[in-house]
Structures are given as C-alpha cells and as structure tokens.
Image: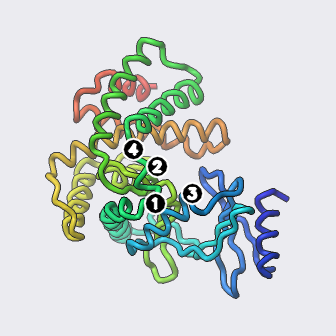
C-alpha cells in the first residue's frame, strides 16, 4: 500500500468514515487524488507528499480567495495538516477536455466561449488578492520565473528529449532573445492568473456548470496568460489566426462587460503573441521532461504543433531571428 493511501486511510478512520476509497489519475502532479465516501455522499481527497501548514498552503489560500470572489472552485470540507490531506467538494468526472473532444462544432464553440468568460472574472479578483494578502499576490511571472521556464525548455527539449544540447554560441544567442522576452512580459504582469488554465483543469458539474480546479499556483501575470494557456494548450493542429483573433475579441469584450478597463485590440494581439512564445515553449519543456523522466510519452505529439504556433507568433512579431532559425530547423526534422 502506498504511503499516500495509508495516510488517507488513517485520516478517514479518525473521522469514522469507512466507505469508498478510489484512486483517481493525476496528470503531471506530485499529489495523489482519491474519491472517498464522505458524510453519506462523495468528496475528493487530495493527499500531499508531506505535512503542511494551513497558513502557508497555497491551495487553501487560493481557494479562499477564489471563493470569496465568487469563482466556481470546490469548497474545502476538511483539512489534516499532519497527514497532508485536504478534502474538497466532488464535481464528478466530466473534464472539459473530454467534453470538447466529443462535442459537435457548435457545442464545442459554446463550451470554449464559456471557459473564456471565466478568465476576466479571475482577473477581476486582482485587487482582492492584494487586499487580503493572498499568496497569489506575492508571486509573479517576473523576469526570473519566465526566464527559468524558458531555460527549462532548452534543457529538457534539447538535452533530455533530443539528447542534442545546443552549441554554446547558439545557446547564448537564444538566451539573449529569451531574456528580452522575459523582461517584456514581466512589465506586463498586472493581473491575477490561474496559471494553468486549460481544458483539463476545468470541469462540468452535474448541473452542467463550469468549475475551476488545480488553481493553487495562481499568481500575477500578463492579461494574455490564461487565454494563451486555454486556447493553445495541447493542440494537435494549430488553430487559424482568424479563429484566435475572434476569441481574443470575445475575451476583450467580456473584460469590459465585467467592469475591467478596455484594452486596445492591436496592443493586446502583440501581448498575446509574446505570451504565446513563452507559454508554448514552457509547455514543450514540460512535455519533454514528462515523456522522458516519467514515461508520459502521450505528450510527444503536442511538441511539433507547439513549435508551429511559436514560429507563427515569432515571425509575426519580428525581433526573434535566432528563435525562428532554431524552430525552422526543428520543424524540418
């Protein structure tokens, strides 16, 4: 029996709960999730690798922030710091990514728009995050964080996945462009972001309402961050430029509808493309690492489309000649 399950069993015995315990499948997480019997119904138990302090636990902190802002995240039902267990509301099994794959075109577009509409509501909670001193307000997509993620991409795509590290001169030239990109995006970091807002982290509950999960890494970032994450995560065919432009316009109009300041469409398109480069390369680093070090080779088919998307964004923007050259080499192989 795993340490995770044994700790969960100890937790449930202490609370006189002796019903269902069924392990759920995490994606790229160090936590383990279980569906459990709870007070005559069901709940989800998240078991962490080690004990934690509730006052410093990011999931608890961000959940409280999101719930206070009216965002559709799970209620926390119980916590055991010593055993590393958090029990939360059970939303069922309908993951948005699966729903998108099985929906017809009209239904898919409707779900995509509903998901996009959640992002301005997250951004509208920015002031509250600072007012309550949330952990999310103290974390930021700053130059250091953004550049680290780009370095992670280089290491794990070229050295780990391909086993062909870049030659030093090319590596240094790429770093110069990555540093410029990171500094630019740091200056744009101004709103609360989910940080991992994609279709595997959204669910449909029994009433068909969209619910947000896996929000513990929320932080301050670019207005475009969560939109890029949602629209361009794990695609096998890059979406058309016209489709992306339509979704950007909808997002901008929804921001205004919820009371946020209007943004210039052309300026936002530039920010979206800058964030596309960083976020998609970060994703390639994760896909490379997960496929080699954790055997999750189902991530591999997403690498080439990410490169195609980044190439289109970098070419459109200009100013990234080294990156464009590197990508063209990779896309030719």
Q: Quick check: 152 left or right of 311?
A: right
Q: Which of the marked residues, 2 or 4, is nearer the chain's N terminus?
A: 4
Q: CA distance from mark 2 to mark 1?
A: 9 Å
Q: CA distance from mark 2 to mark 3?
A: 31 Å
Q: Which of the marked residues, 4 or 1, is nearer the chain's N terminus?
A: 4
| Disc assigned to residue 199 | 1
Q: Nearer the viewer, mark 2 or mark 4?
A: 4
Q: Nearer the viewer, mark 1 or mark 3?
A: 3
**Element carrying mark 3:** helix
Q: Does the residue at mark 1 contact the one at mark 3 (Cβ under 8 Å)?
A: no
Is residue 264 something one can see in this rendering?
yes
Residue that mark 3 sits on: 56
Horizontal and vertical percent position of residue 256: 19, 66
Give the quarter of the image for residue 75: bottom right
Residue that mark 4 sits on: 141
Residue that mark 2 sits on: 234
Q: Residue furthest right?
A: 1
């Amino acid at each position: 029996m795993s340490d995770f399950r044994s700790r969960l069993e100890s937790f449930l015995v202490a609370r006189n709960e002796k019903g269902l315990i069924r392990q759920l499948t995490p994606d790229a997480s160090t936590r383990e999730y279980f569906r459990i019997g709870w007070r005559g119904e069901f709940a989800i138990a998240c078991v962490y690798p080690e004990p934690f302090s509730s006052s410093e636990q990011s999931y608890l902190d961000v959940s409280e922030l999101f719930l206070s802002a009216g965002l559709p995240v799970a209620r926390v039902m119980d916590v055991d710091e010593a055993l590393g267990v958090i029990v939360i509301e059970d939303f069922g099994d309908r993951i948005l990514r699966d729903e998108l794959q099985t929906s017809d075109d009209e239904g898919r577009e409707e779900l995509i728009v509903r998901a996009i509409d959640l992002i301005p509501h997250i951004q509208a909670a920015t002031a509250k995050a600072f007012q309550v001193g949330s952990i999310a307000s103290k974390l930021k997509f700053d130059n250091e964080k953004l550049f680290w993620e780009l370095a992670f991409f280089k290491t794990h795509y070229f050295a780990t996945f391909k086993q062909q590290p870049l030659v030093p001169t090319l590596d240094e030239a790429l770093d110069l462009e990555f540093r410029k990109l990171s500094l630019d995006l740091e200056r744009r970091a101004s709103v609360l972001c989910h940080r991992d807002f994609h279709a595997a982290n959204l669910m449909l509950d029994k009433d068909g309402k969209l619910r947000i999960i896996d929000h513990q890494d929320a932080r301050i970032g670019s207005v475009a961050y969560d939109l890029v994450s949602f629209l361009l995560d794990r695609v096998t065919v890059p979406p058309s430029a016209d489709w992306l432009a339509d979704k950007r316009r909808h997002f901008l109009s929804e921001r205004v509808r919820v009371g946020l300041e209007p943004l210039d469409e052309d300026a936002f398109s530039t920010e979206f493309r800058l964030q596309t480069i960083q976020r998609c390369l970060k994703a390639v680093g994760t896909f490379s690492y997960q496929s080699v070090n954790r055997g999750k080779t189902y991530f591999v088919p997403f690498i080439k489309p990410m490169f195609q998307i980044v190439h289109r964004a970098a070419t459109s923007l200009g100013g990234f000649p080294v990156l464009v050259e590197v990508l063209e080499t990779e896309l030719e192989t």
